[in-house]
Structures are given as structure tokens and as C-alpha cells.
Amino acid sequence: MTDARTGAADAAPTPDAAQPAAAQPAAAQPTGAQPDAAQSAAAPADDARERVAAVCRALAADGLVKGTAGNVSVRVDDGIAITATGVVFAEAVADDVVIVGEDRHLVLGHLAPSSELDLHFAAYADDAVGAVVHTHAPAAIAVSLVSDRLPCVHYQQLTLGGEIEVVPFSVFGSPELAETTGDALSSANAVILAHHGAVTTGRDLADAVAHTALLEWACDIYLRARAAGDPAELSPEQQADVVAAAVATGYGQKHEA
Ligand SMILES: [Zn+2]
């Protein structure tokens, strides 16, 4: 399977319309969450826990998660920093994030990690993945109810891998869900989970959150088009042309005139 992320991944920007607060680098500082001096000087592990908590609060503020639904992680030296189970995203703090080693042992923190721990580790099988975001974003769920894929309806979807797979329903936290999700993420930065939500990956937290926002934006476009007719999709040739143009021009990157 062609990895459509190649080339376009760094070149295609996230559209303004798909950049709520959570998609901006400033996502680590959402409204009402000012880091104190102790946090700025904190050790890397504590810093990662706070950054994950800040992303959770931003995702809740943007309506991409409700209550305790969803989980976020980032790769750290000792494993991954991941939200604990039962965390209310809107109120997440660093203590709600735990560090878990690849052997699944708790390295730091006292709460039980997210029930989707295996799903996150499956995504980190790709060495390029530095962060994982799982939400119950409404447009992605709606797409999963009417289609087994999100066709490539906009060229910026190439940042995610082009067409996005909808994996069949499996119970949350199950080995089956981890396996199907991990397989889908081996060739894309995003996957939709039927009757459940979405998972995106990125180089870092900001990247993974931006991909969540972009996926939700593309799902919304697709749903609007389906309500009006039969959505057209970009052909493989058109997608290849976009990738070639993005690579050739450095599209989406600041550069000297
Ligand atoms: Zn979930």
C-alpha cells in the first residue's frame, strides 16, 4: 500500500478552518491554564504530563471530546505519557497523566492508565510517531455510520494519508481494536473507528492534535457533500500531482522569497 503521507506530510498546511485552539502550538496553554514557574522548570517527564493534560483541556474546549471520552499520549524516554482512565478532559491536570513503560509497567503516577493503552502502543510501532490522540469527534463518528472509508475529498487530506480507513467496530480497550487500529495507522496518520471515534498520530503533540482537527474538518465536508449528492473524490493521479507540487515548492513551509 502506498504511503501517501510521504512528501505531503510536511508540505500541506492545515487549513485555517480546521485549526481550532487545540491545533495551534499554543494548545499547550489553553484558556485558563497558565503554567507556573515550577512547571516550566520541571523534569521532562513532568513536562510531558502537563503538556498531555493541556492538550486534553484544549480538545474538550473545542468540542472534540465529551466528559471522560478519549485519550492522549506522547512518547517519552521511559515509554509513553498517557491519560489515566476516567479523566474528565476539561479538568485534566498533570497528575491525571501517567508514564507507562513498553512492558506496561507504571513508571510514574498513581492512576490506572487509559483502557486504550494497547491501541496507543500499537500506534507507536511506527518509529516516526511521537504522539497519539484519540477522540470521540462527532463528524468522524457520523462518517463511520454511513461509510467504510473517508474518501480523499480535499487535497489537504494527503497530510493524513489521503483516503482514511474506517475500521470495523471492536469493543473499547480490546486487543482486536488495538490491532485493527495499529494496522490502519501503519500507512496513515489517521483512522476512524466505527461507532466509536478517531485516532490520529503525529511527530509531536501539536502535530497529532492538528491531524485530529484536520480529520474532523474533512469528515464534516464529506458529510455535507453526502447530504447534497454523491461526493466526488480526488483521483490517484490528482493526488500524486499534489504531492509532487508540494515537494517541489515547499508548499506550506515558510521560506525566503
Ligand atoms: Zn474511545
Image: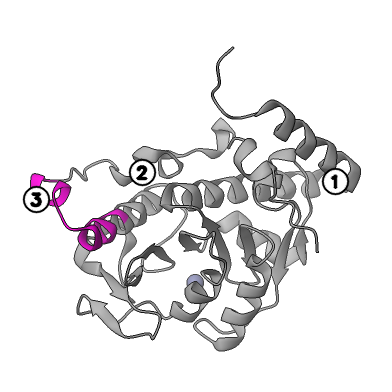
Left or right relative to 25: residue 31? left
Give me the disc on residue 233: 1
**Disc 3 from disc 2: Cα separation:** 19 Å
Give me the disc on residue 27: 2
**Disc 1 from disc 3: Cα separation:** 50 Å
Front residue of 79/173: it is 79
Q: Is residue 164 magenta?
A: no
Give me the disc on residue 38: 3
User: Residue 97's image quarter?
Assistant: bottom left
Magenta region, residue range? 36-51
Mark sitting earlier along the chain (2/1): 2
Front residue of 193/110: it is 110
Q: Which quadrant is the N terminus positioned in?
A: bottom right
**Location of residue 99 in the rendering, given as x and y in whole percent from the top left corner:** 29, 72
Instruction: Please report the residue visible at 11 percent of the width from the left and 46 percent of the height from the top.
Output: 36
- Asked if residue 81 can be seen in this view, the reply is yes
Contact between labelled residues 3 and 1, with CB atoms less than 8 Å apart? no
